[in-house]
Amino acid sequence: FKINMSELIKLDELGKGNYGVVYKVLHRPTGVKMALKEIRLSLDEATFNQIIMELDILHKATSPYIVEFYGAFFVEGSVFICMEFMDAGSMDKLYTGGIEDEGVLARITYAIVQGLKTLKEEQNIIHRDVKPTNVLMNTAGQVKLCDFGVSGNLVASISKTNIGCQSYMAPERIRAENAGQLTYTVQADIWSLGLSILEMAKGAYPYPPDTFNSIFAQLSAICDGEPPSLPADKYSPEAIDFVKRCLNKDPSRRPSYAQLAIHPWLEKYQKVPVDMAAWVKGAMERRNSASGKADTFKPPLHKFTM
Ligand code: ATP
Ligand code: MG
């Protein structure tokens, strides 16, 4: 079935990114709550149509580790993407203070690896934007990936305008982009995965704050410095090894998804029970008390209008 704007009721704003806003909406015909992502782009109608067609292959990407896709359409200079609403939000707001429980960290990592592996093996999709804001959780304790680069046209339109302040790009990709090339391989996603695990463990972006001030200093640190690592006094040798393998500056020496999926660190925690639902409940409480507001109920305001 196809979704259109007139069937959606805006309930809330979930967040803003570099190139769009994400809303929580209610799809009236089905009664399903969805996340609606708006990406404003100045493109001609033909390119918009191509993007919508390319996004359609997302209907085939079904996995317990990938956010479900409900449909896409465009209205007045924006692409709208309807997807599964994840009621605990993104990892960047859940890891408050850092994730010290290795079982939890390993389960989250396992989900990301499985999601990335499915995208690559079943759809030949490279994610291109692995980072904590694109790893979502729900209160059932599930972990799912969103915002992967399915549409070549969308990726191209966005990358022209994208200047993030925290880079999850692998060193080889920073160099390639600097030289005006847009090459991309799966290995670059594995670097971003390593950096994301480190950020979730530490509770902060892993490159030192003094390199925050200038994006140039930060990119130099990534390309020329030693990769960061998990602290040996807090994490097991298996966890440290996993991250270290992902953050190898030589892309050809990073492991494949098949190798990561059977890494001893992930295998160990797949065998023991980890209560992810209990963890996410606590994480949401910490997030809400840190931001000083609870998840208060807001009545639906009005129909979606632009
Ligand atoms: P960037 O623009 O660099 O990709 P981002 O990922 O934070 O950064 P968006 O993808 O626009 O930006 O998302 C904004 C926020 O909306 C996210 O940080 C996340 O907290 C929230 N969000 C996105 N998709 C969903 C979803 N399906 N369910 C619940 N919350 C979501
Ligand atoms: Mg995102």
Image: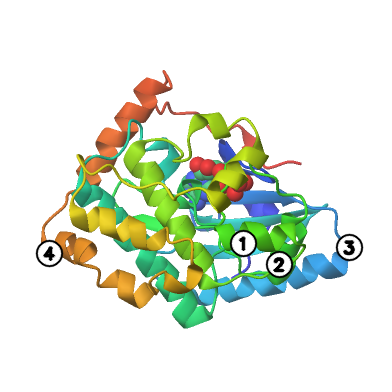
User: Disc 3 to disc 1, how far (Cα)?
Assistant: 29 Å
Residue that label 4 marks: 271
The image position of residue 23, as x and y in percent, is 58, 43
Pointer 4 with pointer 1, Cβ within 8 A? no
Give 118 or 73, whichever is nearer the viewer.
118
Q: Does the numbered disc 4 mark a residue whose Cβ is under 8 Å from ligand 1?
A: no
* Precedes in sequence: disc 2 or disc 3: 3
Assess disc 2: are there few (<14), some (14-19) or many (≥20) residues with their C-alpha within 10 Å of its C-alpha. few
Image point (68%, 45%), residue name: 20
Residue that label 2 marks: 182
- Determine whether the residue tagged by mark 1 lies in a helix, strand or loop: helix
Q: Which numbered dot is residue 173?
A: 1
Q: Which numbered dot is residue 55?
A: none
Assess disc 1: are there few (<14), some (14-19) or many (≥20) residues with their C-alpha within 10 Å of its C-alpha. many
- Determine whether the residue tagged by mark 2 lies in a helix, strand or loop: loop
The image position of residue 72, as x and y in percent, is 65, 63
Residue that label 3 marks: 44
- Determine whether the residue tagged by mark 3 lies in a helix, strand or loop: loop
Pointer 2 with pointer 3, Cβ within 8 A? no
Mark in front: 2 vs 3: 2
Give 225 or 90, whichever is nearer the viewer.
225
In the current view of this chain or complex, which residue is farthest to the top? 292
Q: Does the numbered disc 3 mark a residue whose Cβ is under 8 Å from ligand 1?
A: no
The correct choice, above or below, for 218 with respect to 84 in the image is above
* Precedes in sequence: disc 4 or disc 3: 3
Colouring chosen for the image of the structure: rainbow
Residue 68 in sight from this viewpoint: no
Mark in front: 4 vs 1: 1
Displayed quadrant of residue 204: top left
Q: Amino acid at mark 4?
A: Lys
